[in-house]
Amino acid sequence: MKTVALVNPPARGVVIRDYFCSKTSQASYINPPVDFVCLSGRLAERFEVRLVDAVAERLSTAACRARIQQLNPEAVIGLTGFVSWDRDATFFESLDLPVILLGDILLENPEQRLADNPWADAVALDFTADDPVRYLLGARDSLPSMAYRRDDAIIAPDPARSSVYTFEIPVPLHELFLHLDYRYPFVLGKPFASVLTEYGCPFNCGFCIMGQLGHKSRPVSNVVPELEALRKRGVRDIFFMDQTFGSETNRTRELLDALSQFKPRFRWLCFSRVDRANERLLPDMKRAGCHTVIYGIESADDTLLKTYRKGTTQAQIRATFAAARRCGIRTVGTLLFGLPGDTVASCERTIAFAKTIPCDFISVNIAVPRMGTPMRADAVRRGIVPAGLDRMDQSGAFIAMQAGDFTADEMLRLKKKALREFYLNAPFVARRLRGIRSLDQFRIETRQGISLLRNFLKGG
C-alpha cells in the first residue's frame, strides 16, 4: 500500500496552521490539526497514512525533511498559511515530491498560486470532501473543491458554494495524534482529541472566513463511532472544532444525548455564539460533559457588531455568560481589536465590558483581512490594505491592517492592557487555583500561564 504523509512543516516558534486559520500561538498552545484529523480516515481506506507534525514535535527543517524521506511517501499533503507562507513554500519545494496544499492563504485565487509555484501540484479547499483522495488515485475531472494541474493546464475550483448540507467521514486515525505534545489551555487533561461535527458556519460575520466556506453537518450516527473509538483508546478529553456548536438545535440535542450515554462522561469544550449556546442549551451541554465554551465577544460596540453582521448584542452577551456561570461552565471571551471603524475609545470600552461580565478567560486578537472575507474586500476597495497582501497574523506578532485612529503601537498597547487588567490580578489567580481539579490541569494551566506571561513581558 502506498504511503501519504500529512505534514505540518517546521516553523519559527509555535505556529498554528489549522482549519484555514494560521497564526502565532499566543500561549504556546497547539491542537491536533482538524484538517488532518478529518482527512486521515478517508486516506486510510486507500493509503498508508503517516503524520509528521514538525511544530508539535519541535523538529528542525533538516530533521523534518529526513523524517519524510525515510517514509518515502507517494505524496505529501501539507499545511501552510499567511503567517509562514514563504518559509513553507521553500520547505515543500525542497522535498521534490507531489504536494497538495491546505491553508488560509490559498482560499482566494488558488489557481494563480499554483501558477506562481510550479512545485505545488494541487490545492484542497475542503478537507471533509473526498476530492483529495480521488486526486491521489489519479482522478483529474470533477474535483470541485480543488485547484490542480491537468496536463499543461491548471483547473480552478468550482466557485459556487456546495449545495451539500450533510457529510460523513470514516473514523479518523486519532492514534496518529494522541502521542504528540499537543496542548490547549482550556482542556482538563491529556491526551485530547480534535473532533469536527460541523464544517464551516451558517453565520456570515464580515471579518471571519468560516461563513464563506458554506455549512454542512455530520449525522450524529456518523459521529458516535468516532467517539466510541476515542473511548476505546482511553481518551476522555475532546475539543469540538465546530465553529458554532449548537447552530442546529435539534441535531445538537441529539448529539448531547449521545454524549450523555458515555460513562464516565467525556470532558469537552467548544466554540459557540451567545445566541446559540445560551441559557436554554447550556444546562444540557453541562450534563453531557461540557466544561468550557469559547464565545466571540469581539467588541462592546453594538454598532460595530451590526456593521460586521455579528448578529449579537451586549445584552445577549451578558445574559449568556451569566447563564454559563450558573451552570458551572467556564467561559472564554474572544476580543477583536482593529476592525475598520474601531477606535481606541471603543477598544477601551470593550476591555471595560469584558471585566464586568462573568467571564473566566479572555483571548485578544488583532483584526486581519483574511482572504475570502467581506472585510478584506472592503479594506482593499477603500485602500486600507493592498490587494496582494499575503502576510498577516491575528496574534499581533505583526500588524497587517491599520484602520481608523489606530497605530500599530496603539493596537499592541491595548492588547497588552486587556491582558494585564484581566489576568494580572490576585482575584483571577485565586479563582484559577481554586478551579484546578487534577494534576494534568495544573500542569496545563501552569505551562500556559508562563507562556502568556512571557509573551506579555515581550509586548505580544
Image (cartoon, helix red, strand yellow):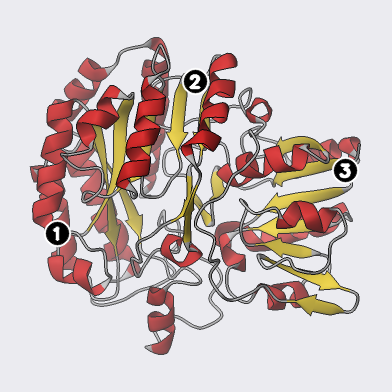
Gap between marks 1 and 2 measured at Cα? 36 Å
For mark 3, give the secondary structure. Answer: loop
Looking at the image, residue 291 sits to the left or right of residue 395; the answer is: left
Q: Residue 190 — which label?
A: 2
Is 152 drawn above or below residue 399 in the view shown?
below
Name the residue located 39 percent from the left edge and 81 percent from the top edge.
Answer: 379
Q: Nearer the viewer, residue 181 or 131?
A: 131
Q: Indicate the amino acid at tag 3.
A: Pro
Circle 2 packing at 10 Å, graded few (<14), some (14-19), many (20+), is: some
Image quadrant where residue 149 sits: bottom right
- Give the residue pinned by disc 1: 313
Is 375 drawn above or below residue 131 in the view shown?
below
Mark count = 3
Q: Residue 73 — which label?
A: 3
Can you give x and y, in whole percent of width and height, for residue 346 in the image? 15, 65
Can you give x and y, in whole percent of width and height, for residue 6 in the image? 73, 43
Q: Nearer the viewer, residue 215 or 360?
A: 215
- Does residue 449 show up? no
